[in-house]
Amino acid sequence: MTQISDRARQLIFARQMRDQLQTALASNSGIVSVSVDGTSVTYGREQAFAEYNKWCKQVQRLSRKSGRFSTFRLDTQG
C-alpha cells in the first residue's frame, strides 16, 4: 500500500480550497462560505478574492516537479 506524501496532501487541500472559492465566487456576489475537510470559513467578497489568489499560487508552487532555481556551471566551455 502506498502512503501519500505530505506534499501531495497539501496539494490536494490547496486544490480543494481553490476550487471551492472559485465556485463560491462565481455563484455569489456577497458573503462567501467555504467548507473543506469539516472546517467552514466565511469571507467577504474582497477577502475571498485574496484567498483565491493565495490558493492558486499555493497550487502552482506545490505542483512544480523541481525547485524554482537552477544551477549553471559557468566555469566550463561548451
Image (tube, helix red, strand yellow):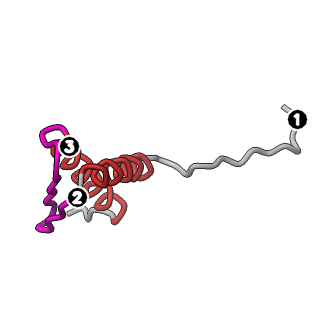
**Pointer 2 local density, CA inside 10 Å: few below 14, some 14–19, many at least 20:** some
Residue beneath disc 1: 77
| Quadrant hosting residue 41 | bottom left
Q: Which residues are magenta?
A: 26-43
Task: Give the mark count.
Answer: 3
Which comes before the other along the chain, label 3 or label 2?
3
Q: Which residue occupies the foreground of this view, 10 or 48?
A: 48
User: Which residue is located at x 55 percent, y 52 percent?
Assistant: 67
- List x then y, in percent, for residue 28: 13, 43
Q: Residue sitting at 12 percent across and 39 percent down?
A: 27
Q: Residues within 10 Å of mark 1 (few under 14, many from 20)?
A: few
Q: Amino acid at mark 2?
A: Tyr
Q: Circle 1 sits in a helix, a strand or a loop, which is it? A: loop
- As drawn, 3 above or below 31: below
Q: Tag 1 or tag 3, which sits nearer the N-term?
A: 3
Amino acid bearing label 3:
Leu
Q: CA distance from mark 2 to mark 1?
A: 56 Å
Residue 25 is tagged as 3
Q: Is residue 5 above or below residue 74?
A: below
Screen quadrant of the C terminus: top right
Q: Do the residues under discs 2 and 1 have CB atoms within 8 angstroms?
A: no
Label 3 to label 1, Cα distance in Å?
A: 53 Å
Residue at horizontal 88 percent and vertical 35 percent from the top: 77
Give the crowd class for mark 3: few <14, some 14-19, many >=20 residues within 10 Å.
some
Judging by the rendered image, the residue that carries numbered circle 2 is 43
Task: Tell me whether circle 3 and circle 1 mark residues in contact (CB < 8 Å).
Answer: no
Element type at marker 2?
Answer: strand
- Amino acid under label 1? Gln
Instruction: Tell me the CA gap for discs 3 and 2.
Output: 10 Å
* Residue 6 lies in the magenta stretch: no
